[in-house]
Image: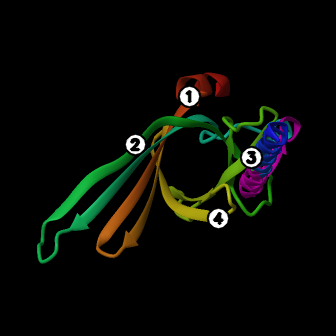
Amino acid sequence: MVLIKNYMHLVKNCLLILSLLLACEVVLAQGKSKHKKKKIAYEVIDFEDMMRRYFGKEKSDPLEGIYTVSCVITKKSKQFLSRREKIRVVGRKDNYARIAVLKDWPGSKRDYVEISLSYHAANLFPVVGELNTLSDGQGFIYKHIEPDGVPISFSMVNESVEMLEAEYSDMQKRKTITYKLSYLKTYPKSSTLTAFQN
């Protein structure tokens, strides 16, 4: 009788352990299905295509080069029933990306392309932006392409030979959120460029 009780107790514990293992397996399987990889909608070029773009042109453009990108996000808000505006920095990232600006193919719908050099795959270079020169030649319309393929248009100006500034503002109720991107040219520097052109 005692032997039968011990055997029944052992069977009950084994069934309990098996049901717990099965429940854990189901929970893990559900968790894996929720975390599918997002498909990135960038146009991607390889190293050979990038070199063909570079060598397929007659001379270098002063805008072309390698840049580091920094970002400052500010929020401007007006107090209720007040004239005073409050501006505060809500985010800052310094040198968070390395990109290359290259002149696009002749006859293309865009003047320049922005190519990420800090992408997670070493042999792929996604096109993360497009630059088109304004008719007066004093600035650019910069279309930044988000990882999900959504474009955001910035206005961009040359602050100096080695610095580009882009800005985008978004109104939300009584608040204005401004994204300011700063592009600092790291290669070729203007002194190197003029030495090559002479």
Identify the amino acid type marked 2: Arg
**Inter-mark Cα distance, 2 to 3:** 24 Å
Mark 4 neighbour density, 10 Å: few (under 14) some (14–19) many (20 or more): few
**Inter-mark Cα distance, 2 to 4:** 22 Å
Q: Is residue 83 above or below residue 147?
A: below
**Residue where numbered disc 3 is placed:** 126
The answer to if 46 sits in the magenta stretch is yes
Q: Read off the magenta span.
A: 23-49
- Which comes before the other along the chain, label 1 or label 2? 2
- Which comes before the other along the chain, label 2 or label 3? 2
Q: Is residue 60 above or below residue 74?
A: above
Of tags 1 and 3, the one toward the viewer is 3
At horizontal 56% and vertical 28% (from top left) the residue drawn is 186
Residue 75 x, y percent position in the rendering: 31, 59
SS of the residue under disc 4: loop
SS of the residue under disc 2: strand
Figure quadrant of the N terminus: top right
